[in-house]
Amino acid sequence: GEDVEQSLFLSVREGDSSVINCTYTDSSSTYLYWYKQEPGAGLQLLTYIFSNMDMKQDQRLTVLLNKKDKHLSLRIADTQTGDSAIYFCAETPDDKIIFGKGTRLHILP
Amino acid sequence: DSGVTQTPKHLITATGQRVTLRCSPRSGDLSVYWYQQSLDQGLQFLIHYYNGEERAKGNILERFSAQQFPDLHSELNLSSLELGDSALYFCASSAGDLGAQYFGPGTRLLVL
């Protein structure tokens, strides 16, 4: 079935790296996305990766894609308090977009 | 600011009523998507319109309907409202048929 899985919570110390993991289901997805939602706000596109790529780096963000295992991860280097938010991964089977339930990233001082 | 606008920001209504939520996509974007976000269900895709035509349907109830107008703005109509319809409703837009989506700030609906 269509189900994007993410762990619900992650706590990381400020300055450390955060790694948020996601498992998706549909290998036909052309794009896989990471979105960020801050409290009281809509979702903000963080980054995306094409399905024919293994890795994409964008400043502090690194996306890794393992198509064999249908596993997507988002690494945030040097995590800051402003990174505190909910992070959603999403796959794009057919003409739809399916979101995970989101991982709440909590930053410890 | 994503460039996607939604009105109203907040809406309080009673069970059995009907409401209309409005979305204006980013300038130049042809696709509009509607989502419902609730605490227990997470973010649920409802429907996608591209240049005025319905493209894909997700978990949209029969009591809900949407349309995209020639000027590309979209409306989501929710009728016979139930308590469980209380949620945040997001609209998103993208340039093409499927691509990176830009989300509006959402409409918070409370059904009493």
Image (cartoon, coloured by chain):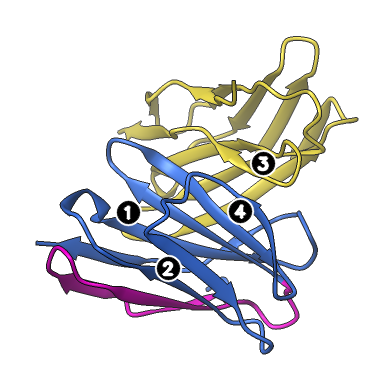
Indicate the chain on which mark 1 is placed. A
- The magenta segment: B4-30
Confirm or deny contact between disc 2 and disc 4 (CB under 8 A): no
Mark number, residue A45: 4
Task: Tell whether label 3 touches label 4 (CB within 8 Å).
Answer: yes
Residue A58 visible somewhere in the drawing: no
Q: Mark 1 highlights which residue?
A: A39
Q: Quadrant of residue B73?
A: bottom right
Question: Which type of secondary structure does the marked residue at label 2 adopt?
Answer: loop
Q: The chain drawn blue is chain what?
A: B
Is label 4 on the same chain as label 3?
A: yes
| Residue at position x 56%, y 26% in the image | A4
Identity of the residue drawn at 77% across and 38% down? A57
**Mark 2 or 1: the one toward you:** 2
Q: How many marks?
A: 4
Residue A27: quarter of image: top right
Q: Position of residue B34 (x, y in %)?
A: 51, 60
